[in-house]
Image: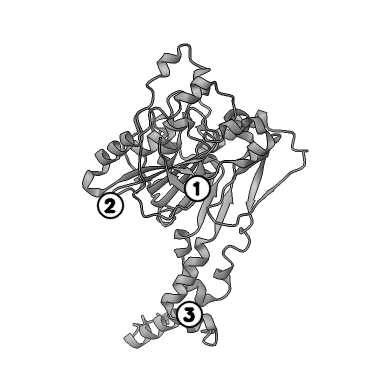
Amino acid sequence: MAPSKIPVAKKYKKSKQDKGNMLQQQHLSRLPLHQQEDSRLMQLAQELRNEIYEHLFCATRFASGMFAFTRNGSYPIVSATDRNGLSILRCCRRVHNEIGSTWLGHVLFLFTDPRAMLDKLCNIPSPVLGQIRNVRVTADKLMLPDQFGKCYGTARILKLLPGLNLDVLTVLDEGGMATSYETLNMLIRHGIGWKELRFISRDSRFLGYGHGLRRRFIDNPQDDLYLHQPQPSDWQQALELRDGIDSSPSVIIYRTNNAILSILMEWPPRMRRVKRKKEVMVVVKRGVGVDYAELQASPYLPGGDIRQHFPGKPWKELQAWQEEFHESDEDDGNAEEWWGLESYTHVDDYIWPTLHESCEDQEMSEDEEEEVGIWMDTYTDESDDDRSDWSALHF
């Protein structure tokens, strides 16, 4: 008796109609079940809805990091919009599909220190990171616990974020320390990853060559005499050398029209320093058509580069190393945990933490105060930007 043949399944070749039906089903599965045709929002043109989405997200920011609310310590900060900032994405599938990931290019990502910025952005894939357009971070140095105790400024920190392609990078110089000039100078001459830089400082001391804090730590004050160059002409020339004169890069220094009044109210004798207490903002714009995106294999920065000092080490590994280094400084964990709620009226609002006041408000002699601003240019405001609270700096 011949053995029975095992039936073999015949290969089924899908017809064009079957393929079309399958693609149609996949397409329908992505569409909302209800088109919201009765909704007033959906009755508007798509272009108008896009304008509404953009307006909503441009008024939204997300904060992350530690903030020094008091002199006694820093507390984790939580943005008031963390819970509802993206609520519109969950209202219906049609809105979710229309917005997609475009919100990344409109919201402001606020980081209270460089470490918080790296903790968040280093975990994002480069294609997604490249969609972020607005970031604000402090000018604090990042110290990595190696045998030399190296500190890295903002320009060097951004090297750990390949794919960064910001429209606006805002840097808050909270401390007003002697290293502020170095941080800004490095960003202008070598920094990439941003199209426009806004460097905001509590006062104009960092622009002068006679910095009181720096003189306390050098043996011969004359060695610090010509540390800085006349600004903004020197920065303007450096930027034109990078981007080309024809690309029209610009560096403009603004001073706020209103002084910081809170300190004056607390200590009236300091009223004589009201002019120096006016905040300063340096606005740097890269040239038109310049490729400013942070690249994966960009050249090392002069004077030291994180990638060169720690070759092949991602931020996660450096972060674990840093946490182990600071483990002895942590408390026993029994203290009550506090969280700071970060609220704002305008998306660009900012406050100065009290942690740096003890350093920033050091008394200066009359000679030192006179020296501040000697090496600055007179610069008129030829920009069309709406900066009603700021005026171009004149000396």
Mark in front: 1 vs 3: 1
Residue under pointer 3: 31
Q: Are marks 1 and 3 in contact (CB under 8 Å)?
A: no
From mark 1 to mark 3, how far is it between C-alphas?
36 Å
**Could you say which disc has been placed on residue 60 in the image?**
none
Could you classify mark 3 by the number of other residues whose Cα lies within 10 Å: few (under 14), some (14-19), or many (20 or more)? few
Please name the residue shown 27% across and 40% down the image.
242
Q: Earlier in the sequence, mark 1 or mark 3?
A: 3
Query: Regarding mark 2 in the picture, which secondary structure is present there?
Result: loop
From mark 2 to mark 1, how far is it between C-alphas?
23 Å
What percent of the width, then of the height, locates residue 94?
50, 77
Residue under pointer 2: 288
Q: Is residue 78 left or right of residue 315?
A: right
Could you classify mark 1 by the number of other residues whose Cα lies within 10 Å: few (under 14), some (14-19), or many (20 or more)? many
Q: Are marks 2 and 3 in contact (CB under 8 Å)?
A: no
Question: Can you say which quadrant of the picture contains the C terminus?
Answer: top left
What percent of the width, then of the height, locates residue 383?
35, 51
Q: Earlier in the sequence, mark 2 or mark 1?
A: 1
Q: Which residue type carries mark 3? A: Leu
Q: Which residue type carries mark 1? A: Arg
The quadrant where residue 133 appears: bottom left
Question: Can you say which quadrant of the picture contains the N terminus?
Answer: bottom left
Q: Residue furthest top?
A: 219
Query: Regarding mark 1 in the picture, which secondary structure is present there?
Result: strand
Q: Which residue type carries mark 2? A: Val
